[in-house]
Image: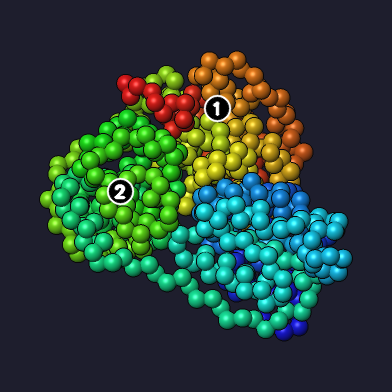
Amino acid sequence: MNSAATVACAILDELAAAGVEVVFGLPGVHNLPMWSDHQPHHPKIVGVRHEQAAVYAADGYARATGRLGVAITTTGPGAANAMGAFGEAAVSGSPILLISSDVSQALRSSGPGEAGQPRGILHEMNDQAAMFKVFDAHGVVATNAHTPAEVIAAVRAAIAAAQTTPTSPHYVGVPADVLGLPAEAAAALPELTEQVIAPESHVRLLAQLINASPKTVIWAGGGVVQCGAAGEEAVAALAQRLSAPVVTTYAGRGLLANDPRIMTTPVHEPEIAELIAEADLLLIIGSDADGMNTRNWQMPLPPKVAAIGLGASLERTFACDALVAADLVDTINRCLELVQVDAGEWAYVGIDDAVRARLRLDERTAKPTAFVEAVEQWPSDGVVVCDMAVAGYWVGGYARQPRPRRIQYPVGWGTLGYALPAAIGPASIGIPTLAVCGDGGPMFALGELATIAQHQLPVTLLIVDDGGYGMLRFDQQVFGHPERGVDLFTPDWAKLAESMGFAFIKLADAEALARELSSPPAGPRLVLMSDRFFPPRTTSPRWNEDPA
């Protein structure tokens, strides 16, 4: 680090040294050194139109790459504007770093009375980091840094944390007058969190439980994805040894893509629910078994449940007969040495195709199933980002993925408006990115169309316009409520696309959509379909339907 550099420059130096390619942000009066001290070797700064979009884009980048996503906001309202997106990243465990300026430390401490008390400085808050500490149960670290050394230490801690599992967001608040100070000598790099090794007794108990369970179903989650190729290989080896089918959470989509044991159908469909219920053991790996994946923990279970994972949330979900809170890969590999199960005969091959065929034949679900199959034509090296919309629910839960990290689905905190700004993240490094939205979600971030156009990002915005909040309309119908507040005025999408420099195409059916998506353009495009889809079983109003 250059000893003459400012703190702002030193932050960007640290990010560059960590391999961060791009950061997302919005300049303000208190954080201008992040732009003015930017050097050619620093990560590219993609300027967005709203602070929430900066964090969504960082989240989208992190989910697509597995690397640290970074957002920069200004003080007070700038930081507060980021809260919705930060919450989604926190609950989903995305490795992001939000760097926000704070008010001048000198101004704050020079007033009468106790130092640090609010005195009317522009954008001032009593404790800006406190907003983000509300997510500390999800592993969030929120720091108010006061000196150049504290700033660099906090940034380095976030960089180190992104290389361990489970991952979670970090927030660092930097007083505006500290950003421009000369950087101090860097503190030593923090050590990576040590691998959590399971006691031998825990591994033996788990192996005994598996050996006593001829029919085991493996439930693989985002924690396996975070472990990279080693995690996927370990789960594949265990599944092969046990002849066990593997179901995945939303975050685990794309794992074991070419393995005959993988189940791509969500656990909400009756065929998969029955498969799990008739097993001897459900083995949860790298998942906190959250409410959205388990129908608020009402899904049928086999006689025994075991889990391998880190984090305290697992203890608050299902009662486990064995819970190993330790490194996934090490635990699985050690368990493999002890497993000698005589696997039962399983008739699970072909379930996915049978469910897909059933959905095609049902007049309620035929059109959305064809839509899902069209979206599956998106190039395998691209990314698909779903919004909280009926079309997004179908794609997020049912589209078959050729690899992990290809699809993003914001069911951590359930933030409507995620897809459009999050798509900026992977697209900013040249990844063709498809944002699957209804007509309501894009309205949260229409300004980001200008961001995409300005940087000529390879984003295809796919809008299924059903004239409002289609899922809420269905909720009202199911609950017997009058349909109020769910029908929306929407813009002339063609004129909007033209005004923002997007190519535009309107399509009438899934066959045409499949052709269009198979060869995405290099620049921005808006694709419009007008339709109303029946929601899938993954949505809560359908959780308790009769399986028949």
Given residues 512 and 166, the one toward you in this image is 166
Given residues 208 and 346, the one toward you in this image is 208
Name the spot of residue 279 as percent of width and height, x first: 22, 40
Against 219, is 151 above or below?
Answer: below
Name the spot of residue 469 as percent of width and height, x first: 61, 27
> Can residue 60 be seen in this snapshot?
no
N-terminal-most mark, 2 or 1: 2
Instruction: Find disc 2 in the rendering and name its residue.
Output: 320
Against 419, is 145 above or below?
Answer: below
Q: Amino acid at mark 2?
A: Cys
Residue 471 — which label?
1
Q: Amino acid at mark 1?
A: Met
Name the spot of residue 104 as percent of width and height, x first: 81, 66
| SS of the residue under disc 2 | loop
> Can residue 54 be seen in this snapshot?
yes
Q: What residue is drawn where x is 62% and y is 48%?
A: 85
| SS of the residue under disc 1 | helix
Residue 196 — which label?
none
- Looking at the rendering, which quadrant does residue 198 occupy? bottom left
Name the spot of residue 425 as percent of width and height, x first: 61, 53
Would you say 314 lies left or right of 87 here?
Answer: left
Given residues 334 and 119, the one toward you in this image is 119
Q: What residue is drawn where x is 66% and y is 53%?
A: 131
Q: What residue is drawn where x is 68% and y is 50%?
A: 82
Would you say 525 lies left or right of 474 here?
Answer: right
